[in-house]
Image (cartoon, grey):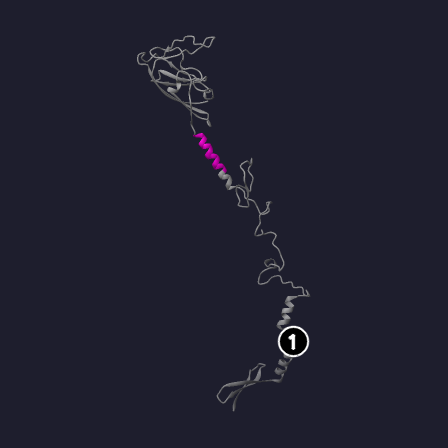
Amino acid sequence: MVNYKTRIYYEKDGVNLGAEVKIYSDTGENIDNILITSESKFQELADKILNIDDTYIDKAELISIISNTQSELQINATKLNGYTPDDFARRIHSHSEYAQTNHASSQATYGIGTTSTYGHNKVINNVTSTEFRNGESLAAYQGKVLNDLVAATKTELTKWEKITLSGHNSIADYCNLYVNKALRLARVTYNRTGVKKGVASNKDSKNKDNNPSPYWIVGVTTNSLIYLHTENAIPADYQPSTRVNQSFYRGDFVFSVLTNGGIGVHNITGKGSKDNGISIRQNVLYHY
């Protein structure tokens, strides 16, 4: 058993006129609705249904049109959601303006590093380049090469070698000679006590002392230098390039290392005792 409820409606001064019938089951459930309208409205609706295929397209047809597989349409949308065509990537395209993942190159294509900009650098594995070039960096290995060179140079610059002496008047008993061959420096230490006399400073035609007797160097003023050790007491390879003078004993005496390798003393004021002699303790540095 079903029940029917009917509602008739009309809009004054309007165009809508119709009736609605609702069908209910005996339990009160709305089974269906029947809408009743005028013949003109019905005909209008029927015409729209008959012409629906000409008015609307189905999903498959829409997809076919958008795909445009046969290039039958000229799609000329200037913007899509506010974006121009340049904002979108084509299906098949390339980016020649971008560097590929591995973009090592022998050319400066992707920009080189300079003193003011970051960029690509080429590693240089030598220390012989004679000019600055942008984009060149020194290999870390060359840092070790330079470090080894500095270390070796430092060793040579700080190395002092003792030279064996065997010259005149037992010089080795009083004198030590140390040389730094890298810097061509020599250091003479002289330690001798009770020194009273020296030897002649000039030779005759037969290469003999003009006065074979020793010269006093204490208690009298010497006219010139008097040798303690004659020439080549300091070996020829380490003789000073110019005469080296150094005062001692309150400045009254002058200790000299000569360019011929001899060592001598000059008593300027005649100071000292002939009985006790003079003590000579010198440390002389010179270039050879």
Of residues 34 and 287, which is closer to you in this image? 287
Disc 1 designates what residue? Answer: 53
Left or right of 197: which side holds 232?
right
Q: Which amino acid, by three-letter code, is at mark 1?
A: Asp
Of residues 193 and 153, which is closer to you in this image? 193
- Helix, strand, or loop for circle 1? helix
Q: Is residue 62 magenta?
A: no
Q: Residue at position x 46%, y 33% from top? A: 152
- The span picked out in magenta is 145-158
Rendered image quadrant of residue 174: top left
Q: Residue at position x 37%, y 18% from top? A: 247
At which x and y percent is residue 236? 47, 19
Q: Is residue 149 magenta?
A: yes
Left or right of 288: which side holds 129?
right
At which x and y percent is residue 195? 34, 15
At which x and y percent is residue 69? 66, 65
For disc 1, the neighbor class at 10 Å (few under 14, some 14 to 19, many from 20) is few
The answer to whether 113 is drawn above or below residue 254 in the figure is: below
At which x and y percent is residue 259? 45, 18
| Residue occupying the far bottom of the picture | 1
* Helix, strand or loop: magenta stretch: helix
